[in-house]
Amino acid sequence: MNAGVVCGSLLVVVLVTVVAPRWLLGWEAPATPDAERAKAVNDIRTTLLQGLAALAVLIGAFFTWRQVQVSRQGQITQRFTAAVEQLGSASPDVRLGAVYALERIARDSPDDDATIAEVLCAFVKRSGTTDPFHAWPVPRDAAHKRELALGHREDGPMAVRAVDRQAALTVLGRRPRRPDRQRLTLDWTNLRQVRLPFADLADADLHYSNLAVAGFQGVDLRRAQLTGTWLAGAVLIDALLHQADLRGALLWHARLDGADLRATDLTGADLTGAVLKGTRLDQADLRGADLTGTDPGAAGLLGAVADATTVWPAGFDAAAAGVVTAGEDAPPLRPQSVHDLPR
């Protein structure tokens, strides 16, 4: 291999210094006098050698750049491997450092962003699976719903009891937005009392997760899959939930002040005691939803769809608020998909 490169290089030099100058002179200026011919050949030779030197510099720069890229990728692979190993450490401090190391790798290497998002989602899910659906408490009445909504506050916020998981979710919630960004998969996960204000969780899959007393102020949950989620006591002030799927979600005493729930699917959702001041529920599907103890008049309901199974507070005039009553020809309620069925 090396001998071939040397022979090839020598051949190029001979062509540039001996053959090419005379050929070019004969082609471009065949009538050059003999007295000027040697100088003309030398000038052509000098020009060709300068071009050859420049080409050699460019080739060397290219191979140097390639070597740097290979070395960089090797370093990133080593850093990624070390960080993943540290996620399994028994020390919370080591796991916390691993989470932030993975965030740094994702910034240094955008191509690895999707893989790192999957790793962090798996870490969060492995560390906190939610209770089976059949084990969730069944409320006796509206007062018991309030008691259950407030009861989750007793064990403290996630940032205190599981700082590494809180950090992982914070990192996931502040990833740069890219056209091919990985969808976050955090279904059936215990995330009670997580704090993610203004996080970007658009399109995330959180179905049947425990989000009780979650701090979601200003969070972006547009088009998110939130079927059957436990959002009792959650703070969703000014949150973006446009076109989210909230079928069967439990929103007992949730703070929805100023939240955008336009065109959301709230069929079968329980909003007992939820705060709806300035909430936008225009064109939302409220068939089978329970709004006991709320003030729907403080929300925007233009074009929202309800039916005979929708539970409104006593005395509320849904039609006057712009709610449309679904007739017999209305599209049927969407069935829950296979992964939503109780385990």
Image (tube, rainbow, N blue to C red):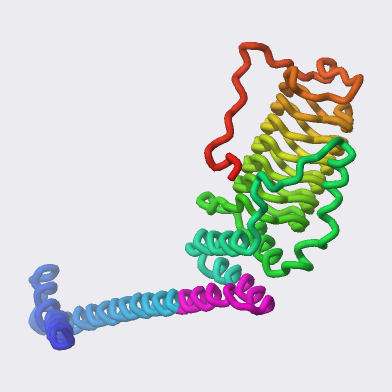
**Residue 11 image position (x, y, % from top left):** 12, 82
| Residue under the image location 77 percent in, 35 percent down | 270
**Residue 112 image position (x, y, % from top left):** 49, 64
Q: Which quarter shows the N terminus?
A: bottom left
Q: Looking at the image, is 282 positioned above or below residue 118?
A: above
**Residue 54 image position (x, y, % from top left):** 31, 78
50 sits left or right of 280 in the view: left
303 sits left or right of 48 in the view: right
Answer whether residue 45 is visible to the viewer in this image. yes
290 sits left or right of 176 in the view: right
Q: Which quarter shows the C terminus?
A: top right
Which residue ends up furthest to the top in the rendered image?
A: 328
In the image, 54 versus 249, the foreground residue is 249
Q: Looking at the image, is 165 positioned above or below residue 147?
A: below
**Residue 312 image position (x, y, % from top left):** 83, 24
Q: Looking at the image, is 269 positioned above or below residue 240?
A: above
Q: Does residue 83 show up magenta in the picture?
A: yes
Q: How many marks?
A: 0
182 sits left or right of 46 in the view: right
| Residue under the image location 42 percent in, 79 percent down | 71
| Residue under the image location 76 percent in, 63 percent down | 158
In the image, 230 versus 164, the foreground residue is 230
Which quadrant of the figure has residue 208?
top right
Answer whether residue 17 is visible to the viewer in this image. no
Main SS, magenta region, reads helix
Q: Does residue 112 show up magenta in the picture?
A: no
Which residues are the magenta region? 75-101
| Residue under the image location 62 percent in, 70 percent down | 99
